[in-house]
Image (cartoon, rainbow, N blue to C red):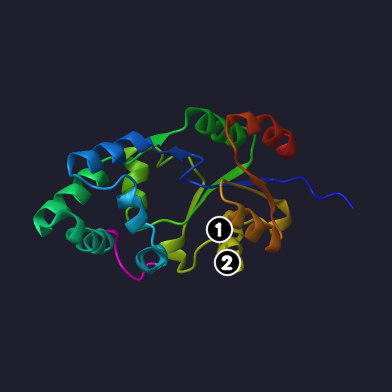
Amino acid sequence: MSRERATALLVDFDGVLRRWDPAVAAGVERKYGLTEGVLGEIAMSWGLLQPVLTGKVSHADWMTSVAEALTPSVGDPARARAAVDEWQRYRGEVDPDVLAFVREARAEGVRVGLGTNATDLLDADLAALGLTHELDVVVNSSVVGVHKPAKEYFQAACDALATPPSRVLFVDDEDRAVAGARVAGLSAHRWSGPGDLRYLRAALAY
């Protein structure tokens, strides 16, 4: 039996609508004599990441923990903090092709939500990137209290979109999130780049 046509779109933030230039972190790491990739490695360690993604700690507290973990590599707490602060000043860039797709879908009557594992800095990031009014709803894991790929996260997202799971198309660049969405009853597509947009337009069939 064929699926119902999707009438709502749920788009991931990092890796889909927002992209990061790896040269920025690499430049900070070189400047402070750090091993390449160490900033992201520490920040993404699950013990530090999980609490901030579920709203148990703030973004600021998370970065304090990253600086503390970085201190042995730098040898000085103030220098570690300076490295983290400089790294964090860069907030990524909007993918113009994805933004154009979001605008097009909304113009065709498709409700579009941002579905992201994020911190309490998300609203400020959306404002800084000019995205505050580009989405119908924002589903932030740190507000919901549970993160992708949990079924409860996707249930909350569908509730926010006021759309049943069977009518929501989810787009993410991580396999685990895509698999979780499918378990929750959504259609889901693994994002690999702007070349996917033709398929997504066809899936929405507007």
Q: Which residue is mark 2?
A: 150
Residue 98 seen from this side: yes
The residue nearer to you, when weighing 99 against 188, is 188
Q: Dot 1, how many residues are within 10 Å of its Cα: few (below 14), some (14-19), or many (20+)?
A: some
Which segment did they paint magenta? 55-59
Where is residue 112 shown, x and y percent of the image?
Answer: 57, 44
Mark 1 residue element? helix
Q: Nearer the viewer, mark 2 or mark 1?
A: 2
In this rendering, the answer to whether 182 lies above or below 135 is: below
User: N-terminal of the two: label 2 or label 1?
Assistant: 2
Where is residue 87 shown, x and y percent of the image?
Answer: 25, 44
In the rendered view, does 186 fall on the left or right side of 139? right
Where is residue 50 shown, x and y percent of the image?
Answer: 41, 66
In the rendered view, does 32 fall on the left or right side of 156? left
Q: Dot 2, how many residues are within 10 Å of its Cα: few (below 14), some (14-19), or many (20+)?
A: some
Residue sitting at x 52%, y 47%: 12
In this rendering, the answer to whether 21 lies above or below 55 is: above
View extreme (bottom): residue: 56
Mark 2 residue element? loop
User: As shown in the figure, which amino acid type bears the numbered disc 1?
Assistant: Ala
In this rendering, the answer to whether 100 lies above or below 40 is: above
Dominant SS in magenta: loop
The residue nearer to you, when weighing 23 against 56, is 23
Judge whether residue 21 is colored magenta. no
Where is residue 57 shown, x and y percent of the image?
Answer: 31, 68
User: As shown in the figure, which amino acid type bears the numbered disc 2?
Assistant: Ala
Residue 164 seen from this side: no
Location of residue 153 by image quarter = bottom right
How many numbered marks does the figure carry?
Answer: 2
Looking at the figure, which quarter contains the C terminus? top right
Q: Which residue is mark 1?
A: 160
